[in-house]
Image (cartoon, rainbow, N blue to C red):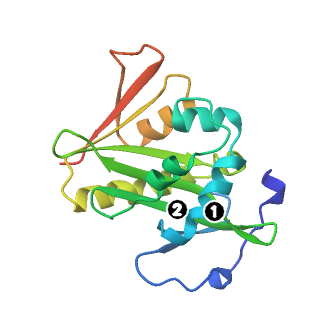
Amino acid sequence: MAAEITQQAHTSTFPVTSGEHWIEALDDGTHVLIRPLQAKDRQREIAFIERLSPQSRHFRFLCQLKEPSEAMLDQLMTVDQRQNMAYVALAHVDGELQEVGIARYAAAPRAGECECAVTVMDSWQHHGLGRLLLHHLIDHARAQGFKLMYSIDAAANVAMRDLAQAAGFSTVRDPDDSSQVIHRLSLA
């Protein structure tokens, strides 16, 4: 719940991080650390998925999922920063540094295209976190030479529709499944 989120006035409370990272303020002034997903984040990723509401897990995986399998976790944790990239958002919640959002892409079978997903913890939604994560992901995909980014989502996922629209994606119904939509963004 929003009341459980610890507002951070200074950024010195985040662990020392080397490499690419940002400490950014959300719309409500809360600070988050955004950085590439690392192998050491595996337990945080499990906890993040388990803390999502059933609806958020369904929107993220397009199926009902109680907990991720080891094979799924292996796939989610595979980040080579070229063909597969993920940015994680970390924040202090109840005295613990927790994953509160993640944005990722994976190269698609068609050359120059990548599929993306953005997931934000339910209590952290509507504060601009998804927008920040997606912005970093788009910039990275462009820098890696991708020409098109797309996301396949449940048509009922209004939050993703609004985020995609705000980021300039176009949206069409999935011709193979009327319960889904496809958001596309030219990166060229």
- Badge 1 vs badge 2, beta-carbon distance below 8 Å: yes
Give residue 44's mark. Answer: 1
Task: Give the farthest residue toward the front.
Answer: 70
Camera-nearest label, 1 or 2: 1
Instruction: Using the image, tell me which numbered label, if any, was put on residue 94.
Output: none
- Residue type at the position of mark 2: Val
User: Is tag 1's residue or tag 2's residue first in the polypeptide sequence?
Assistant: 1
In the image, residue 179 sits, relative to residue 23, either above or below, namely: above
Tell me where residue 173 appears, x and y as whole percent.
38, 18
Q: Nearer the viewer, residue 161 or 104?
A: 104
Say few, some or many: other residues with alpha carbon within 10 Å of mark 2 (under 14 / 14 to 19 / 20 or more). many
The residue nearer to you, when weighing 127 against 124, is 124
- Residue type indicated by callout 1: Arg
Compared across the picture, whether 13 is left or right of 105 comes to right
Q: CA distance from mark 1 to mark 2?
A: 10 Å
Q: Residue at x 41, y 76 (%)?
A: 20
Q: Is 87 drawn above or below residue 65 in the view shown?
A: below
- Answer few, some or many: residues within 10 Å of disc 1's Cα (few below 14, many 20 plus, some between 14 and 19): some
Q: Nearer the viewer, residue 159 or 182?
A: 182
Q: Residue at x 48, y 32 (%)?
A: 161
Residue 88: mark in rendering:
2
Task: Give SS at disc 2.
Answer: strand
